[in-house]
Image: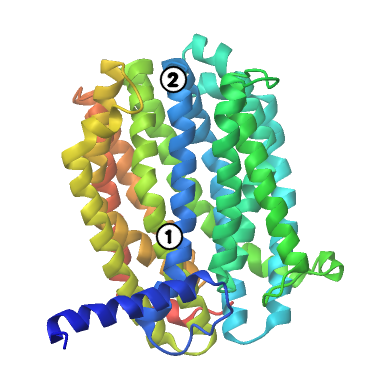
Amino acid sequence: MPSTTTALPASKLRRLYTVIKQSMNGEARDYTQGSIRKAVILLAIPMVLEMCMESVFAVVDIFFVSHLGKHATSTVGLTESVITIVYSLAIGISMAATAMVARRVGEKDAAAATRAGMQAILLSLGITVLVSVPGFIFSGQILRLMGAEEAAIQSGVGYTHIIMAGSLVIMLLFLINGIFRGAGDAMMAMKSLWLANICNIILCPLLIRGWGPIPAFGLQGAAMATTIGRGIGVAYQLYHLFNGRGMVRFTLKHLKPDWSVIRSLVNIAWPGTLQFLIGSGSWIVLASLVVQTGRSDASAGYQIGIRIVMFFLLPAWGLSNAAATLVGQNLGAGQAERAVLSVKRTAKYNAVFMGAVSIIFLLFAPWIISFFTKEASVAAYAIDTVRIVSSGFVFYGIGMVYANAFNGAGETRIPTIINFFAYWCFQVPLAWLLAKILHFGPVGVFAAIPIAESSTAVIAWLLFRQGKWKLKKI
């Protein structure tokens, strides 16, 4: 007979396998009942896998672009710093859609959940036009304002043009996945992002380097691959929203604007968007400080390092998205204490994961960076970026869960206020002081990041404990 010590792990492994299988089959579930641990895992697995593919997407892009030289790498990094404004708008509206759809799903009101999702899409269409058109027209001026060298502008402005023109697919990909997550359909969100990014991974080397009848487009090929891949992902999302069998299912009648729902979405989305604009704006300043104090070598190294850091931060963000969905649905079902326990359990898992990643970066940063660049000066900055920024990973993991818990409740103002003070009143002045006044250069900018991020985690935890978010009505 097997011993107790061997039988117990085997039974646990079987239970874990069963839960993983359930999380991947895409069936509709009620996350307001049963085991909290199981609910977190069921939602987290596809959400983490979704963000893992987004991480691969970022690394694949920088891998191929970095081999085109430091000017190409710097241009991509600076463009990404600016396009985070679009990401911020997309995430802000997506956050509102997730919160409202999750709340209606918790109330078991499928029609209201569907209506909220479509109104969020209509809102995003108008906003994207206002951002993408000026971004396309003034691409060169934007890169110059960011501090890019003239050679980088001349070789990279075409890349920026294409990325700005494709802002709509960026917006829709984020937003619609937010709708799926709010409905508890994390599997569909994962599939759409995987499809988009697999297409990008295939197209990126083909369009950058050329192959057979396909001409080499160089840096512009990277932008084309990104835009086409995301466009395919959006087409897949829309097909399932109009033809799927989930709780949220669009019909043509939902295309009519519902101004009361749009106003409710805006009330949640504007502080949520501001929340990420504050963060992305500070990242633009940091990227500019790096290029000012270290020129293209430092900028290229910083962009490589940040992409690698994001490779691990995005899965952690996926886990925090599970907390947002659980908070929204449990508040809708009138179970506030279950929402609290869900957040605490998710924060614990995220802290363990991020702590393990920080150890990996500390030990293996030079080896990891060696795959992306052979330029010694660029590699040195990339290694510094990875090691210094990852020193705050445990706090990042905890902080993003509590911030997303507020967002899932529709209480987007609290994280917005936290971000403003942590980034603009602390991180940016600290980076400026360290980089320019104390002459630490780019390393001073790197150091300001974990210090500020750790402070946001502590503040978010303290405010979460007060519990006022439980009373938010949406």
Q: Which residue in the rendered view is the most extreme toward the front?
A: 1
Residue 67 numbered mark, or none: 2
Vertical comparison of 126 with 254: above or below: above
Q: Residue at x 63, y 44 (%)?
A: 230
Task: Look at the image and tell me whether residue 97 can be seen.
Answer: no
Badge 1 element: helix
Residue 91: quadrant of the picture: bottom right
- Cβ–Cβ below 8 Å for labels 1 and 2? no
Vertical comparison of 329 with 287: above or below: below
Vertical comparison of 376 with 282: above or below: above
Badge 2 element: loop
- Whole-number angstrom distance, CA of label 1 to CA of label 2: 29 Å
Q: How far from the left and from the top, in percent, is residue 253?
A: 86, 70
Q: Residue at x 41, y 40 (%)?
A: 282
Tell me if 111 is positioned left or right of 221 in this view: right
Marked residue nearer the N-terminal end (1 or 2): 1
Residue 187: quadrant of the picture: bottom right
